[in-house]
Image (tube, rainbow, N blue to C red):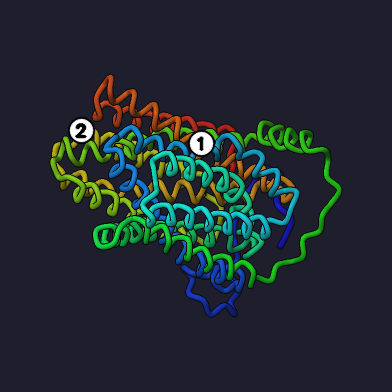
Amino acid sequence: MGPAQTDGSLETTLPIPRASRVPHTFRALRHRNFRLFISGQIVSLVGTWMQNAAQSWLVYRLTHNELLLGTAWFCSQIAVFALGPLGGLAADRYSRKKIVILTQALSMLQAFALAALTVTGHVRVWHVLALAGTLGVINAFDMPARQALVIEMTCREDLLNAISLNSAVFNAARVVGPGVAGLLVAAIGEGLCFLLNGVSFLAVIVCLVSMRLPRFERKDQPPVLEHLADGFRYAAGHSAVRRLLAVMGAATLAGMPGLVLMPFFAEDIFHRGSQGYGVLMSAMGVGAVFGTLVLARRTHASGLARVMVFSGLTTGVCYLAFAFSRSYYLSLAIMPVVGYSIMRQMASANTTIQILIPEEYRGRIMALYAMTVVGIGPFGSLAAGALARQSGARATMAMGGCLALAASTIFALSLRRDPIAA
């Protein structure tokens, strides 16, 4: 693994060894450690999406309160924003592999606790909110370490492919998990979904323990606060990283109206109910899987910034078209394009940042990345809800489209002055 570049440029080609027998689109699987990681992810992510769907249904069954549905989601995400920098700091000071093993074990215990409360009939909505908040704290430390660990499991040459494949697995699980959860909840109840999710973490833990990574060597580190501040200074002073984080933060905020208001569009505008909502979200997931697999075929990192621009502009146009669509089937046709564009933008940004930053900053910068794509989501959801109440769902969706277009246009203009990739 070569040293990370710090001069703001990307390698123009990422060579693929001729001896590799792995199909081109899946070339990162030639690395044993990544094969183990992705195998565990396939099992665990389906369980995670099962729990997400079952948890939402449980909250609604207990309260019949839409606000509490949003509150549960807020509790599970806000810690990524509040504690993300500490998670990134930990990923730069301690063994990332051990951090991820610990966070996965704690996530397993969280799922088992929720299962036990639900199966025994003792669960109350405050239990769900508290455990959702607990999982958010765990994820604040898990996400930076897991993102930074990917390059250790593969190499710089296969980083784009690895991130794309991981995104494809994530979105495939987003399609499969809720569907399986719906069947299990109807047949047995939410508790079994939580139990199965807890068991699914065993697959990740076993795979992580089985990895053969270089032994972590603890280096002399500056005091904690100084080390933390140094990460912020690096991000603020690095033009490319700063612009990438800014455009992804704007993309996250632009996408929140669609996520938050999609049930309203399905029920009140298109009159398709929960089934129509599920089909819309599944269509988005299918597009996301396809987009990341297409991106995985790229053998070079040059041009990823342009992929981000095109993807952001496409997403903005799709949001506007969805906002003014009067046809359910037209809206359904738009959703795969939205998923395709969003995930290509995210995977491109993730790869570009990881190639640009030096190893000693990887955990802290990836924590900031997690804050932009996940941590500010709760604020965006609250803003989307408030705007929809004042201006209506269609206008709010259109505002998201305008924000996506504006952010991508500004990012494109900045590339003309100061290119990120040659």
Residue type highlighted by circle 1? Ile
Q: Is residue 256 left or right of residue 355?
A: left
Residue 80, picture quadrant: top right
CB under 8 Å between callouts 2 and 1?
no
Q: Which residue is mark 1?
A: 78
**Of 49 and 249, which appears nearest the observer?**
49
User: Which is nearer the eye, 336 or 270?
Assistant: 270
Q: Earlier in the sequence, mark 2 or mark 1?
A: 1
Q: Secondary structure at mark 1?
A: helix
State the mark number for residue 410. none
Q: CA distance from mark 2 to mark 1?
A: 31 Å
In this rendering, which labeled residue sits more in front, label 2 or label 1? 1
Q: Amino acid at mark 2?
A: Phe
Q: Which mark is residue 324?
A: 2
**Quadrant, the N terminus:** bottom right
> How many numbered badges does the structure rendering display?
2
Residue 310: % across, % down: 41, 43
Q: Is residue 28 visible?
A: yes
Q: Residue at the location (82% across, 54% down)?
A: 218
Residue 182 as seen in the image, left or right of residue 309: left
Residue at 51% x, 36% y: name it.
78
Q: Is residue 291 visible?
A: no
Residue 103: x and y in percent read 60, 54
User: How many residues crowd mark 2 within 10 Å: few (<14), some (14–19), many (20+)?
Assistant: few
